[in-house]
Amino acid sequence: MTPLLLQALPIVHVLLGVLLAAWTLAFLLRIVLTWYPQVDMTKGAWPLIAWPTEPVLVLTRKVIAPIGGVDVTPVIWVGLISLFRELLVGQQGVLSQILLRSAQAVA
């Protein structure tokens, strides 16, 4: 790996971890909001949650219809994002292992 890439990797690792954690939190809030269908997602602070989540939920709803009137797509995305986060930046994740091995090579 090039030295420039190795210098940028810790920053990418942290930013990706924070981004995926924030996205997970947004989807968890969407799960709670499915219990309150009367909430207007265009008013107050709700657009901050709807803006990053709604595009992927719309696409997923086309593939997975509500089950018994319950929208399960936010739950599916929480699971997928958690999986991606663990595979990429988790303790045994790909980026974590590259960082660990590069630190061992320098030492």
Image (cartoon, rainbow, N blue to C red):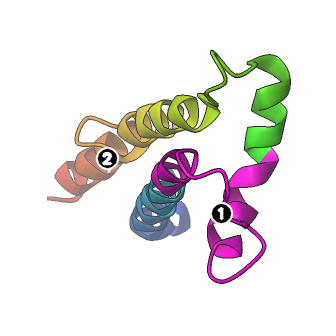
Between 9 and 35, the one nearer to me in the picture: 35
Taking the spot 53% from the left edge, 59% from the top edge, the residue there is 26
Up-down relation of residue 11 to residue 61 (above or below)? below
The stretch drawn in magenta includes residue 54: yes
Q: Which residue is mark 1?
A: 39
Taking the spot 44% from the left edge, 58% from the top edge, the residue there is 25
Q: In this image, 43 relative to 32: left or right?
A: right
Q: Is residue 2 visible?
A: no
Q: Give the mark nearer the N terminus: 1 vs 2.
A: 1
The residue lying furthest to the front in this view is 38
Up-down relation of residue 80 to residue 13 (above or below)? above
Magenta segment: 27-55
Up-down relation of residue 29 to residue 56 (above or below)? below
The stretch drawn in magenta includes residue 31: yes
Q: Position of residue 30 (x, y in %)?
A: 56, 52
Taking the spot 81% from the left edge, 49% from the top edge, the residue there is 55
- Mark 1 is surrounded, within 10 Å at the Cα level, by few (under 14), some (14 to 19) or many (20 or more) other residues, namely few
The residue lying furthest to the left in this view is 107
Q: Which residue is mark 2?
A: 96
Q: In this image, 88 relative to 4: left or right?
A: left
**Secondary element at image label 2:** helix
